[in-house]
């Protein structure tokens, strides 16, 4: 019997001639080849309704709706090894407060910042009568219900929603929208960052440290020298065009569904530190203009260049934006003393909402599959771009500038993606060479009848950290094979 092999979506399909029935009729005399066929037929029998004549049989089963939802929206959190070990070691007879802190850590992480900000806000609302502000500004409160959730779930902070909505939909001055974005995120993103720390979600600390340092400088320079020289339409169009080009680059990258990703930046070196500093600097300038930027810049470099998983890059960007917005708020209020009263009024009607929405969004987003998180970014940036072209009065110069920004963004992010692919190939090549060296060392030791030094080193590391144990176990598996 002739077998034809082909691939469908990466799976091997086997095409058999005939009527699709693999059962063999009884034979008077069985040759060796016929016995092989009969054995294959018995082992690969399927229900009749699943067998179709003259069609390829795909090994991979189609997911049900429930399986699809579980994969993309209930994948589970990427926690640090400390929290993972604490959950595994939790005794069923442990005191209630210990079970609450370990098993229900996420609920406690949302409740603590929520209660803290609510106590402060309600005391101020009663003292200064915040209720009178809602009738004329309730639309911002409704906007930030969605904005705060998206801020906690994705790499795009609340400013990425508030700035385009306020400037494009409601015609609010970009300076006021920018100040409000910085102020509201200094509350909401800080609450979300606390929840992320409390839940011990996996973070990329190199990015947090060095992008924060670069972001402080970029924020100051952007507020003092760059933002005053841009017109409101330039700010609106420039913001949406730059991040649409990034979303498109991320979309192209994620067409490869099984691409290799890392939890943190692999093989961290000096040049990677410099890249993160420059990323933070550029992101600080964007934040100074539109109230959001360092989070998206960090996310783009981590995912496109260093191939860090979106499940790590997203909470990392939330923590980064929390610190950067505090710096921006401080600079605008204390150094420049230029925050308008309108920005404070908008802040007053949104604080009780965002301090719940942003942490809750972080908890929900931490369970999403990385492709689901990326999908949210595609939708947000595309909607913002279309809205900007529909609402902003366009001139020939502005259209040319927007097309130029998008084209430059495509090239820039495309080059970053290409560089990231080359870096990943070099890392994987180095890992393969190291594994091969270990295997060769094992084989040579067996020939000489002595224990290799590599195994001694591995045995010495067995009591190390969780990451080391995982690497040792993985290497042991390779050596045994």
Image (cartoon, helix red, strand yellow):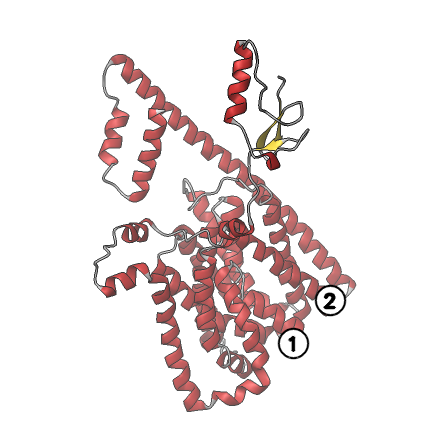
Looking at the rendered structure, which numbered label has been put on residue 140? none
Q: Is residue 21 left or right of residue 150?
A: right
Q: Can residue 331 be seen by looking at this rendering?
A: no
Q: CA distance from mark 1 to mark 2?
A: 13 Å
Count of numbered labels shown in the rendering: 2
Query: Measured along the vertical axis of the image, is residue 296 above or below residue 162?
Result: above
Q: Is residue 205 left or right of residue 226?
A: left
Q: Which residue is mark 2?
A: 390
Q: Quadrant of the N terminus?
A: top right
Which sits in the foreground, 43 or 318? 43
SS of the residue under disc 1: loop
Q: Residue at the location (54% across, 85% down)? A: 134
Q: What percent of the width, then of the height, locates residue 412?
A: 61, 47
Q: What percent of the width, then of the height, locates residue 480?
A: 33, 25
Q: What percent of the width, then of the height, locates residue 10?
A: 58, 34
Query: Measured along the vertical axis of the image, is residue 475 above or below residue 113?
Result: above
Q: Which residue is mark 1?
A: 170
Q: Residue at the location (31% across, 21% down)? A: 442
Q: Residue at the location (63% across, 56% down)? A: 244
Q: Residue at the location (26% across, 27% down)? A: 455
SS of the residue under disc 2: helix
Q: Quadrant of residue 11?
A: top right
At label 2, counting other C-alpha atoms closer than 10 Å, the crowd grade (few under 14, some 14-19, many 20 or more) is few
Q: Is residue 122 left or right of residue 97?
A: right
Q: Can residue 466 be seen by looking at this rendering?
A: yes
Q: What percent of the width, then of the height, locates residue 120?
A: 38, 81
């Amino acid at each position: 019997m002739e077998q034809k092999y082909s691939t469908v979506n990466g799976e091997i399909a086997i095409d058999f001639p005939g009527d699709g029935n693999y059962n063999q009729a009884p034979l008077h005399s069985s040759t060796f080849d016929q016995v092989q066929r009969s054995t294959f037929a018995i082992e690969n029998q399927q229900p009749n309704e699943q067998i179709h004549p003259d069609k390829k049989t795909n090994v991979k089963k189609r997911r049900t709706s429930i399986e699809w939802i579980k994969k993309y929206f209930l994948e589970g959190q990427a926690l640090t090894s400390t929290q993972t070990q604490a959950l595994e070691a939790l005794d069923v007879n442990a005191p209630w407060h210990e079970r609450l802190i370990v098993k229900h850590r996420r609920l406690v992480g949302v409740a603590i910042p929520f209660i803290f900000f609510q106590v402060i806000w309600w005391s101020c609302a009663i003292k200064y009568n915040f209720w009178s502000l809602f009738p004329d500004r309730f639309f911002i409160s409704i906007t930030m219900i969605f904005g705060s959730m998206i801020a906690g779930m994705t790499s795009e902070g609340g400013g990425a929603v508030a700035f385009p909505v306020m400037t494009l939909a409601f015609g609010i001055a970009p300076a006021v929208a920018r100040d409000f974005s910085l102020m509201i995120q200094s509350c909401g993103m800080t609450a979300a960052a606390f929840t992320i720390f409390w839940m011990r979600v996996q973070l990329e600390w190199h990015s947090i440290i060095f992008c924060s340092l670069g972001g402080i400088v970029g924020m100051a320079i952007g507020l003092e020298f760059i933002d005053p020289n841009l017109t409101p339409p330039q700010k609106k169009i420039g913001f949406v065009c730059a991040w649409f080009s990034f979303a498109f680059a991320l979309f192209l990258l994620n067409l490869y569904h099984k691409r290799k990703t890392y939890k943190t930046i692999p093989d961290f070196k000096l040049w990677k530190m410099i890249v993160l500093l420059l990323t933070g600097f550029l992101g600080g300038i964007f934040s100074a203009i539109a109230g959001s930027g360092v989070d998206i810049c960090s996310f783009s470099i981590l995912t496109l260049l260093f191939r860090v998983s979106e499940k790590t890059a997203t909470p990392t960007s939330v923590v980064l934006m929390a610190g950067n917005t505090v710096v921006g708020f401080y600079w605008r209020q204390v150094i420049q003393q230029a925050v308008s009263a309108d920005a404070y009024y908008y802040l007053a009607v949104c604080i009780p909402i965002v301090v719940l929405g942003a942490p809750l969004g972080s908890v929900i987003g931490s369970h999403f599959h990385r492709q689901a998180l990326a999908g949210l970014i595609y939708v947000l940036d595309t909607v913002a771009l279309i809205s900007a072209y529909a609402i902003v009065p366009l001139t020939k110069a502005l259209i040319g500038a927007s097309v130029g920004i998008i084209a430059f963004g495509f090239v820039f992010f495309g080059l970053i993606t290409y560089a990231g692919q080359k870096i990943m190939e070099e890392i994987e090549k180095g890992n393969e060479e190291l594994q091969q060296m270990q295997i060769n060392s094992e084989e040579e030791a067996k020939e000489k009848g002595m224990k290799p030094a590599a195994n001694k080193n591995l045995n010495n590391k067995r009591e190390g950290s969780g990451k080391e144990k995982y690497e040792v176990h993985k290497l042991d598996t390779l050596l045994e094979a």
